[in-house]
Image: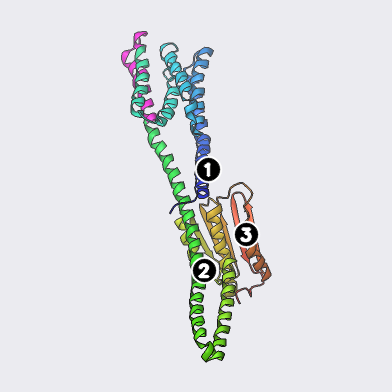
Amino acid sequence: MRLTRPASRTMSEHTEATRGRLRRLNLIMFLPLLAAVGALLVATDARTWWHVMVLSLGVVAALVAFVRWAARDISRVALPCLVITAAVWLLGALVLDSRMAFYGLSIVGSLAVPQLPRHRGAAVLGLTAYVAAVGAARLLITQEDVSGVLIGYVIVPAGVTAVLTGLMFPNQRFYGLVAELEEARQREAELAVIRERMRFASDLHDIQGHTLHVVKLKITLAQKLVHSDAERAEQELREIHALVSDTITQTKELAYAQRRLNLSAELENAKNLFEAAGIRVRVDREAEVDAHAGELLGQVLRETTTNILRHAQAEQVRITLSESGIAIVNDGVPEAPLPELRGLATLKERVVGNGGELTVEQEDGRFLTAAAFPHGRSEAAR
């Protein structure tokens, strides 16, 4: 089933919001760690203030690249950061006697190479070869032990760079899968709303389809009786009038969510809709719901379910049932003014009119919808 443009736009916004949360999580978790490791390596390898400046330049370039990578915008800084960190490694290996000067290059390379549209394998080999070649060039200017130079300046730097870059490929795929799962969840939510609309259409068909068929038969009968049995024809016309009036009433009740509902059926339907959309559901029954309040509470549950699927990015929903009340709490509420919820506004009028209370609250990313009849029994369902 093809989604409309507004639905597709909403799905993209939700997906981008998920990616934004992952980016913030990356910055919070890894940026301080990368900075601390870089500072430790500079303090260990630097012998003069000039050494500190050069090695710090490589660390800063790595941090800038990481920040832009987390913002999905590394392409703008990839080349200058690679040039800077490559130069730092060259100076570190050949001039500063720093075995850890490759740190910045390994970070920037591992972030930039997986973002390339093609030839990524060749880029990994080229990056690793450069790190190894610079380390090997130290053999030309030093009298140190060959095995020590090979291990400290060739094998370890090239191996670390290759491993870090290789690990970023499945990492990138992981974030792609997260985005795909979010899109799938939003698609399921939209489909759940569509299924709810189809159920409404089915209810409308049940009401009016049957009535129209009966009216057709009665009109045909009245036409036959109008000359032979006028009294019977008049009776048929009165029945037609009553039937049409009753159908109008039922249609209005359906349109304003006032048709009789079964709370248990609505609860099962809500659970199925939420689970289909990838939302965890917890149901707490503190007591059996009062039969007279059940119908209105079922209407509140149905309307709230639709609102959650359409307006929230919920991951969890908790439904609590008491003897004469229901409370639905969901997370995933955006930090923005709520859209106008006309269905709940209409229900609030009826709940209040029957001696009940309907509460709607938004706080700290959570949304509460609660309906209760404090005095026990409601006459709403009578």
- Please give left or right for residue 251 compared with residue 127 in the image: right
C-alpha distance separating marks 3 and 1: 26 Å
- Name the foreground residue: 182 vs 48: 182
Q: Position of residue 83 (x, y in %)?
A: 45, 19
Give the quadrant of residue 89. top left
Of the two numbered discs 3 and 1 on the same chain, state the one appearing first in sequence. 1
* Residue, disc 3: 342
Of the two numbered discs 2 and 3 on the same chain, state the one appearing first in sequence. 2
Looking at numbered disc 3 in the image, what kind of residue is underneath it?
A: Arg
Looking at numbered disc 2 in the image, what kind of residue is underneath it?
A: Leu
Task: Please name the predominant secondary structure of the magenta segment in the image.
Answer: helix
Which mark, by number, is residue 204?
A: 2
Which mark, by number, is residue 17?
A: 1
Query: Mark 2, mark 1: which one is toward the viewer?
Result: 2
Identity of the residue drawn at 49% across and 86% down: 224
Q: Give the secondary structure at mark 2.
A: helix
Q: Position of residue 61 (x, y in %)?
A: 50, 23
Of the two numbered discs 2 and 1 on the same chain, state the one appearing first in sequence. 1
Q: Position of residue 359 (x, y in %)?
A: 65, 60
Which mark, by number, is residue 109?
A: none
Identity of the residue drawn at 48% across and 29% down: 74
Whether residues under marks 2 and 1 lie with C-beta atoms below 8 angstroms apart, the answer is no
Farthest-out residue, left: 147
Looking at numbered disc 1 in the image, what kind of residue is underneath it?
A: Ala
**Residue stretch rendered in magenta on the structure:** 138-165
For label 1, count other residues whose C-alpha is less than 10 Å away and answer few (under 14), some (14-19) or many (20+).
some
Identity of the residue drawn at 52% across and 47% down: 10
Query: Mark 2, mark 3: which one is toward the viewer?
Result: 2
Q: Position of residue 300 (x, y in %)?
A: 58, 64
- Please give left or right for residue 217 compared with residue 353 in the image: left
Identity of the residue drawn at 48% across and 22% down: 81
The answer to whether residue 36 is visible is no
